Amino acid sequence: MQKLVSFVIPCYRSEQTIGKVVAEINNTMESMAQYRHEIILVNDASPDNTFRAIEELCRQHKNICGVNLAKNFGQHGALMAGFGHARGEIVVCLDDDGQTPADEVDKLLDGIEAGADVVYARYQHKQHSGFRNLGSKVNELMTRVMLGKPKELYISSYFAVRRFVADEILRYGNPFPYVIGLVLRATKNIINVDVNHRERMSGTSGYTLGKLLGLWFNGFTAFSVKPLRIATVIGVVSACGGFLYGIYTIIKRLIMPGVPIGFSALMAALVFFCGIILLMLGIIGEYLGRIYISLNNSPQYVIRESIDERENDE
C-alpha cells in the first residue's frame, strides 16, 4: 500500500516561485511509486498575490490544500497551521523559494524508511547572503546551548518527520511555537542527509534582523529556563565582584589614607551593576509576559480561509 507524504510549505512573497516548487514536487513524486502525496500551502499574509497563485494551483491539482492566514504569524506559526492540515504518514517541510531542492526529497524519505524519526537536510555550501549565513550560525549556537541540540546535528528548514512526531508537535497549544524545539523534545532519533542548496528563484529573503532576533529569543525563552539560570550565575558573580571590590577599597583606604577613592570608579561600578540588574529583570519580565499571553489563549495562527478539495483518505 502506498504511503501518503504531506508537503508543508509556508508561503510569503512567493507569487512567482510557488508554482515551480509545486511542479517539481509533483514531477519528483511521480517517479516514486511507493508513495502518494499531498501539498499544503500556507499563505502567511503575504502582501503580494501569493494566495491568488495558491488558489489557481488548488484548481489545477486535487492534491493541494491552500490555507490563508489572517495576518503574518511567522514561519513557525505557518508551519503549525500546515501540520494541522497534513494527513500523511510522513510530513516534509520545505521553503517556497526553490532553494530547498524538492527533487532530492528521496534522500529524506530514505532516511525515514531506514528508521529515523526526523531527517534534516544538510547543506555543504549554502547559497544565502552573508547576513543569513551569520543568522544561521547564531541559531546553531542558540539551539545547541539553550535547547540541547547535539553539536553534530545540522538544523535546516528542509526536513521530514514521522506522523507521531507531527502529532506531538501539534500537542503544543501555546503561542510562540518553535518547531525546532518541539522536534528536539519529541525525539532524539534525528539524522542528517546531504542535499544541494540552490540560489533563490527570485526576490529576497523575508527574514529581517528584527524577525531573526525575535525567532532566536522565542526559541530560548519558550523551551528553556537556561537564560534564568545564566542570569542567576551572572548575578552571583557580579555580587561577589562587588563584594571583593568593596574589601579592596577598604584595605586600600587603610593602607594609603591619602589616596582618593575615585568618583569615576564608583560610578563605573554603579552603572555596571545597575545594567546587570535591569538585564536580569528584563529576562524575568519576558518569561512573565509570555506566561500572561499564554493564559489569555493567544492563538498560534488564525485562518482567514482555506481551500481543501483533497480526496478523502480512505
Image (cartoon, rainbow, N blue to C red):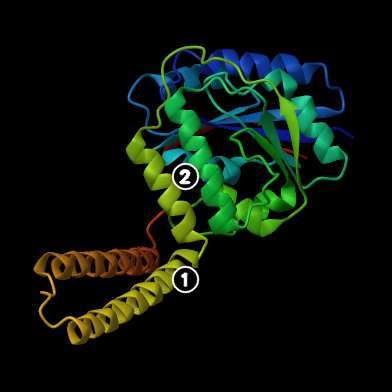
Above or below: residue 3 compared with residue 54: below
**Sequence order check: which comes first, mark 2 or mark 1?**
2
Observer able to see residue 222? yes
User: Residue 300, position in %: x, y?
Assistant: 44, 51
Q: Pick the quarter of the image with the C terminus.
A: top right
Dot 2: element: helix
User: Residue 285, position in %: x, y?
Assistant: 30, 67
User: Residue 141, position in %: x, y?
Assistant: 54, 47
Q: Which label number is shown at residue 229? A: 1
Dot 1: element: helix
User: Residue 215, position in %: x, y?
Assistant: 43, 46
| Three-letter code for the amino acid on which mark 1 is drawn | Arg
Observer able to see residue 71? no
| Relative depth, front residue between 126 and 298 | 126
- Residue under pointer 2: 77
| Relative depth, front residue between 303 and 113 | 113
Give how far apart the Cα atoms at labels 2 and 1 are.
28 Å
